[in-house]
Amino acid sequence: MKVGIIGIGHSRFGRRDDVTVQELAFEPFVEALTDAGIQRSDIDATIVGGSPVYMIQRSIAGPITEYLGLNPKPVWLTEAACSSSAVALRTAYALIASGMHEIVLVLGGQKMLEQSTA
């Protein structure tokens, strides 16, 4: 079975005090759907790669997919420091190659400046 990336999107990079992490994920989500030529309902599962700020939000995967209107489909958070998004891609590949899912959304993102560096 061949597995491939069918659509991509990217949010504006930089200090984003203007949006929540959910809104930040929405930007590339819409771009990726358009690029792939698919609908939200075509997505079977979602993998979110990121390291949450533990004092604020333990798992960002649930709130992001709820905001994107993807519930009640499966969602996972992959957390591997700077490799979180790469691990998310690998997890999605395994889920598709195994035949468990056909279309898996992979999102990478987080907001690192939500609390002070102290």
Image: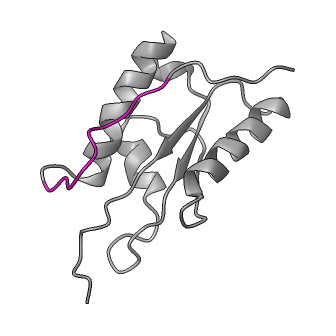
Residue 38 visible within the image: no
In the rendered image, the vertical position of residue 58 relative to residue 24, given as above or below: below
29 or 63: which is nearer to us? 29
Residue at 35% across / 42% down in the picture? 25
Main SS category, magenta section: loop
Residue extending farthest to the top is 37
Residue at 43% across / 67% down in the picture? 52
Image quarter of residue 4:
top right
Placement of the N terminus among the 4 image quadrants: top right
Query: Residue 43 at what x, y percent from top left?
Result: 56, 26
Query: Residue 86 at what x, y percent from top left?
Result: 62, 49
Relative horizontal placement of residue 55, taking residue 17 as reference (left or right): right
In the rendered image, the vertical position of residue 31 relative to residue 59, given as above or below: above
62 or 72: which is nearer to us? 62
Relative horizontal placement of residue 73, taking residue 19 as reference (left or right): right
Residue at 19% across / 52% down in the picture? 16
Residue extending farthest to the left is 18
Tally of numbered tags: 0
In the rendered image, the vertical position of residue 30 relative to residue 68, given as above or below: above
Residue at 56% across / 50% down in the picture? 85
Relative horizontal placement of residue 30, taking residue 108 as reference (left or right): left
> Is residue 35 covered in magenta?
no
> Is residue 11 covered in magenta?
yes
Query: Residue 87 at what x, y percent from top left?
Result: 66, 52
Residue 110 visible within the image: yes
65 or 51: which is nearer to us? 51
Give the residues drawn in magenta, as a range. 8-17
Placement of the C terminus among the 4 image quadrants: bottom left
